[in-house]
Structures are given as C-alpha cells and as structure tokens.
Amino acid sequence: MNNSKWIFGILILLIWSCQPKDEIIPDPQSEKVRGAIFESMQEWYYWNDELPASINTADYSSNEELLAAILFKPLDRFSYLTTQSAFNDAFVGKNAGHGFGFAFDAAEKLYLTFVFDESPAGKDGWQRGWEITDINGKAISQYKTSSGGYDFKLGTSDPGITNSFTFNLPDGTTSTRTNVKAEYQSNSVLHQEVIELAGKKVGYWVYQSFKATAGQSPTKSLEVDESIKFFEAAGINELIIDLRYNGGGSVAVAEQINNYLIQAVNTNKLMYTNKLNSLKTENQKSVNFKKGGSLNLDKLIFITSRGSASASELVINSLDPYFDITLVGDNTFGKPVGSFPLSSYNSILKDNNVELVPITFATANAEGKAEYFDGFPADFAVGDTPQFNWGDQNDLRLAAALNVVENGYVGGRILNTFYRPKWEMIDQFKGLKQEFPAY
C-alpha cells in the first residue's frame, strides 16, 4: 500500500511538473501593453522630453490611439507600431500583395511606376509605363476623394484578395488583368544599364528600398553586391542613381552602398554620426567609410522625388561632403531621423508580438548637416513621366540627368515640364508601409 501511494504521488508530481508554469497568452491590445509602450517611449524616444509626465492607459482604446496622442507632432510623422514578423519580413523583402506602384503624370493619367519581378503582377508581365484606366470596373476618376486625393480600395495586402485592372498598353492595345495578391520576395534593383554618352560610360541604377538579403551576417544586400560588380566590370565614368520611389529601409544596406561609392582616398573618413536622447548618449556612434570595390567617381547624380525618404536621404547627405552631387526631379521627403525596433528591450512588447518603432535617433553628415525636415531641394526640378519604361530616354528625369552628365545643366525645355502631383503614393501609406510602399 505504501509503495502504491508513493508511485501515485510520483505520477501526480510528474503530471504537475509537466504543466507550463507561466503560460503566456498574448493580449496585444491590453492596458499592460499600452503601459509598456509608454515606458519604452520614455526611455528611447528621441523627443522623450516632450512626452507627458504620465498617462492613464485606460483612456485609450488601442495602442495606436495612445501612440498618436503622445507623439511630438511638430516633427514626428514617422513613428509607428507593427508586429515583429511584419517588421522583420519587410526589411528582407518578404512581401504580400500585387507587387506594384503607380503614379499620375502631368495630365493626371495613372501609370504603373514599378513592378517587382517575383510578385503576382511581375509574373503576369506587368511593366512600368502601362496606363491604368479602370480598377475593378470603375474609372480612375471615380476613386477621387473630396480632399483631392484618391482611395483605390484595393484591400489589405493579405494573400487571396483579387482586383482587376484595365490597361492601355504602349502598343495601343487594351488589356484587362485579374490579379490575386500573394506572398513574394521583392527585388530592390528595378533596372541597371550602361549608357554611352559623349565618350563616357554612364551607369544608370534604379534602386527601390534598402532591403537586406535574409541570412546575411553582417547585414547586407547581395543584390547591391551584384549591381556594383556589373558597373565595375563596365568601367563606368559616371553614375545616375534613381531613388524616385525609394521610401527607405535598412541603414546597414545604406552604409554598404556608401562604402562602394566612396572614393578610396576618403576611406576611414566620417560617414555620419547619430544622436540619441539624453538618457542614451552612450549608444551614440560615429560611422566611418570603409571603401569597398573599385568604383572611383567624383560626381553623382540622384533622381529624387517626394517619395525619396529616410535611408535614401541618409545616402545623399552622407556622400555630399565628398562628391559633386546633383539632384534631379523633385525635393525629397524630409526625414533626417531614424528608428530601431524596441521589442527586444521590453519583454511585455516581445511576449505580445507588438513592435514599437518610434524615432530614436537623428543623423548628421561630416559637415554637421542634420536638420532637413523639409527635404533636400532638387537642383533641377523636372516632372515625372511614368508613361515611359525604365531606360527609355524619353523619360524626362532620366533625360535631365543625362543632360547634367553631358552639359552640366538641364535645358529649359525639360525644366518647363515640371509639375507636382496632387496625389503621391507615399501619402497613401503610413508606418512600415510608407517605408516600403507598394500595392
């Protein structure tokens, strides 16, 4: 009897010991999470001295409502919330959706601006320059809102959502395509070529978002490596970098590109410094150039727009002290500050799959240039012409950049084409999607 009681007791003990002691059931919209958001903002937010001294988490119905209420609104239009998986996927190009962008021309006709190769749209053969006349059977004008913008009602990016598009194609035909959203791997390099001009070999590089290759340590982009090798092998004398639809991305990849572009004579010189809030000064750093590859350029031409933001502007600002830089197109977005995700510093956020990505630092170049919230002004203002495919020299922004290569300036005929669209795609998105805008 005693033995059987002992065995029974051991059995109960084993069963009890196999039960999880502290099973964590995520509740991402709880008051506990909202408290963790506020605490993390007090610790890390760049403008933490502008936060309220305290809050009542019960006053807010969602994490998003809380964050919106406490942001330093004069300057912060960037901080956001997402999930850890969405954040990590975006920065290595794991997307879901149709996989394209679009923009209006001067006549307010809507065109595809870019298409990711492996996306549902890319696999269906869509290309920049196709005019979109109808979406889901309705003319584009029917999607115009009372404010003058557009809401195309394409749904979330979830796989399985279907939309139909009617196109006027460059050959004069019309085509209606039904496209189903799916998961895909997006590419950053949309186009690369070498153009022979006035005895020079001119590299033309269309780069859309600073995305790393998954699994690389240290963080880097293999696409960038391959593109630079392409231009090195061609022996280019000049380089045009097209960032007109580049909303930003990985700072590590921006540094990788800078290190390829910097001249060997300037290796080890200051690329940029970053500044954190007064609680985190020990985390501030200076980043120096480390020359990679064999490119040796003195001038750079960037094609920019209001869609050129964040890491795009970091590249331009960091290189400006060391190059003769010309901007063609439109003024950039204006984001001289950056973020890193905070869930790894707060267990409540981590356990509830909440990723808080507030502004945590500001950057300055080697000359101390840091405050460019209005963006960098274009040296030559030239309107976008999305009706022409990549590399077509009828594209006025490319033509203008080539004018700069050949003559050092842009002729009045091209400058007279400048217009600023009433609606731009970057305005359609907020948070993580604004950094990687695509439908």
Image (cartoon, rainbow, N blue to C red):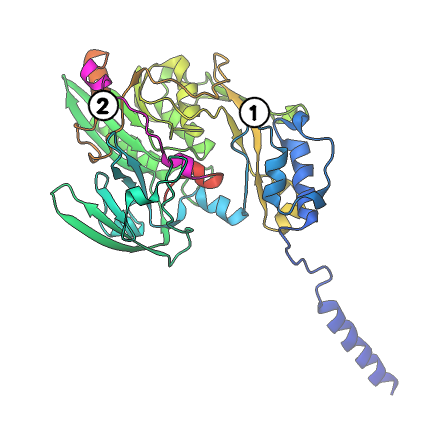
The residue sitting at 24% across, 34% down in the picture is: 386
Tell me which label, 2 or 1, sits earlier in the chain.
1
Residue 339 quadrant = top right
Q: Magenta region: which residues?
A: 411-429
**What element does badge 2 sit on?**
loop
Q: What's the amino acid at mark 2?
A: Ile
The residue sitting at 41% across, 39% down in the picture is: 428
Q: Is residue 21 above or below residue 298?
A: below
* Residue 79, image x, y percentages: 55, 35
Q: Which mark is residue 236?
A: 2
Residue 225 quadrant = top left
**Which quarter shows the C terminus?**
top left
Residue 167 versus residue 113: which sits nearer the camera?
167
Tell me if residue 228 is in the magenta stretch.
Answer: no
The residue sitting at 29% across, 42% down in the picture is: 141
CA–CA distance between discs 2 and 1?
Answer: 43 Å
